[in-house]
Amino acid sequence: MSERFKFGLNDYLASRDPAPPVKDLAEIIASRMFHPSIEVRMRNAEASQVRPTNDLMCREVQQKRGDTVIKAMEEANVSAIVYPTWDNPPRLIGDLTTPAGDNSQTLSPGTGFPAITVPMGFVRGEFPSGMTFFGSAWSESALIKLAYSYEQAANHRRPPASTPPFK
């Protein structure tokens, strides 16, 4: 969890209407309603005393990343980048040693560009696995078309066994 986590979570909880049963990260920690494996990270996030103020710098970095991605996509003559949302199966609850493999927190959040994830199959027989379609700014329409076409052709979606069918 980053130094921004506490402030982002607290802002989000304060914006909810109706108000959630907890108002901030401190109350979540006090509730003990989370898996013990993340307690240290939550307490470290709660210890952050100063709200980060480098938003302008973050926007400048995001802009540079976006420019780099657009240049690479133009040079490769592609309208989207497609990749597995995760490059490792999901961790089991409490497992902090297996590589997390999360690919979804790099391109889209780092550039502000859109991305969409669709089912691409299953790992370990039961855990859904996703494929991400990532595009440049304002490419949502093209990404939706690509993702929909793939989803219809591959037909990887499988409703959870615990969910009754729609009527």
Image: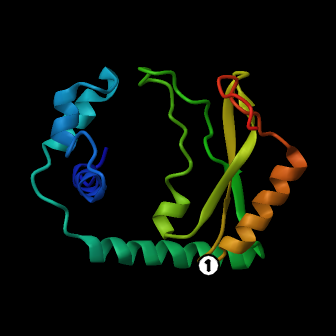
In which quadrant of the rendered view does residue 16 lie?
A: bottom left
Q: Quadrant of the C terminus?
A: top right
Q: Amino acid at mark 1?
A: Trp
Q: Check the image and name the residue furthest to the front.
A: 167
Residue 83's spot in the image, x, y percent? Answer: 69, 52
Instruction: Tell me what residue is drawn at x 52 percent, y 26 percent.
Output: 91
Residue 7's spot in the image, x, y percent? Answer: 22, 55
> What color scheme is it?
rainbow
Q: For this view, does 6 lie left or right of residue 127?
A: left
Q: Is residue 31 above or below residue 73?
A: above
Instruction: Tell me what residue is drawn at x 46 percent, y 21 percent.
Output: 93
In which quadrant of the rendered view does residue 142 lie?
A: bottom right
Instruction: Tell me what residue is drawn at x 19 percent, y 62 percent.
Output: 52
Residue 99's spot in the image, x, y percent? Answer: 51, 31
Q: Is residue 39 above or below residue 147?
A: above
The residue tagged with tag 1: helix, strand or loop?
loop
Report crowding for label 1: few under 14, some 14 to 19, many 20 or more residues within 10 A (C-alpha).
few
Q: Check the image and name the residue furthest to the right.
A: 153
In which quadrant of the rendered view does residue 96 lie?
A: top left
Residue 128's spot in the image, x, y percent? Answer: 68, 34
Q: Quadrant of the N terminus?
A: top left
Q: For this view, does 41 lie left or right of residue 115?
A: left
Q: Which residue is mark 1?
A: 138
Q: Check the image and name the residue furthest to the left.
A: 49
Q: For this view, does 40 lie left or right of residue 128?
A: left
